[in-house]
Amino acid sequence: MQEYISQINKAAWETKAYQAWVREHGTPEVHACRLKEDPRHPLRYWLKYTGNPSGQKVLNLLGSHGKKAVCLALLGADVTVVDISEENALYSRGLAAAAGVNLNYICADVLHIPDEETLGKFNYVLMEFGILHYFTELSPIFALAGRRLAPNGRLLLTDFHPFARTWKQTVNLQNPTGRYFDDSIHEGEIAFAKLLPEEERQGLGTVLTRSWTVGDIISSAAAAGLCIRTFEEIRYAGDPSFPEFYTLIADKLEVQLTPLYR
């Protein structure tokens, strides 16, 4: 099932994604100029957990158009991105070149990275915004993070809060399901569709996704041997009584875990 979903989603992400990023951010050259002015702002959710990233190795899984990766590289990090979309890769490589930074961008399914072991170990694994809903199981993606983290390395995961996905309509989440424990696969509009005018949306593919609960996310990270350090809930600007995002910080510690079920 996961491979079928990945194929469907890859096809959707390779239709007009580059066009959408140009409409949203400008050409890679224009976007790079803005990022160079203040590379810290796009990283504001994570720098308090990393400190100065200069000299650190960062693996950005499902890194999309490369904005966060390029900002990390501008601050001196050695960044590798893995993403399934050739159009995302095209924009990201152009962005890195315009910003004058090196970026290792691997266009591949993150669960089937060619010669994964040759990537080595990383100080940080970053996953951000609209990530986990592409997986039918969470254990493989957290296991990948664990394999690629060096001892005492840190996972940085920021995504849409499951409560918002269920009960709150926001700018980013237009159709709350109303079902917190829904584990079915849903067909929906691809994320960048809203960036294109109506007349340019013809031919866009749909994506297949599923929702996860807070318990699913935390438990899966812990089951992969990662030590949960914090689960930060980030308020929705339009209604501060409600969370829109969360940031999960988990470290790879050299400890022997006892079985959860004896």
Image (cartoon, rainbow, N blue to C red):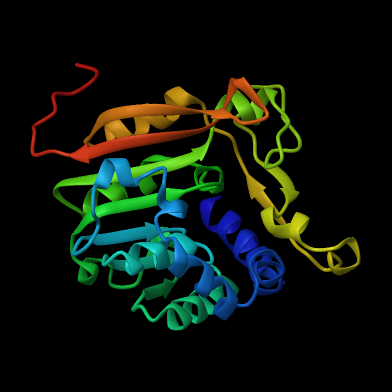
Q: Which of 239 and 174 lies nearest the eye of the viewer?
A: 239
Kindly identify the residue that appears in the image at 60 percent across and 39 percent down.
210
Q: Which of 26 and 222 lies nearest the eye of the viewer?
A: 26
Left/right placement of residue 199 relative to residue 4 reads: right
Considering every residue shown, the one lying at the far front of the view is 37
Q: Which of 36 and 196 lies nearest the eye of the viewer?
A: 36
Kindly identify the residue that appears in the image at 35 percent across and 68 percent down.
74
Across and down, in percent, residue 68 comes to 44, 59
Kindly identify the residue that appears in the image at 62 percent across and 31 percent down.
237
Asked if 171 appears above or below 34 in the picture, the reply is: above
Across and down, in percent, residue 162 comes to 56, 28
Across and down, in percent, residue 134 comes to 55, 48
Considering every residue shown, the one lying at the far right of the view is 199
Kindly identify the residue that appears in the image at 59 percent across and 30 percent down.
183
Viewer can see residue 220: yes
Which quadrant holds residue 171?
Answer: top right
Which quadrant holds residue 17?
Answer: bottom right
Q: How many marks?
A: 0
Q: Quadrant of the C terminus?
A: top left
Asked if 197 appears above or below 250 in the picture, the reply is: below
Across and down, in percent, residue 194 comes to 77, 55
Asked if 102 appears above or below 169 in the picture, the reply is: below
Left/right placement of residue 237 relative to residue 59 reads: right
Viewer can see residue 66: no
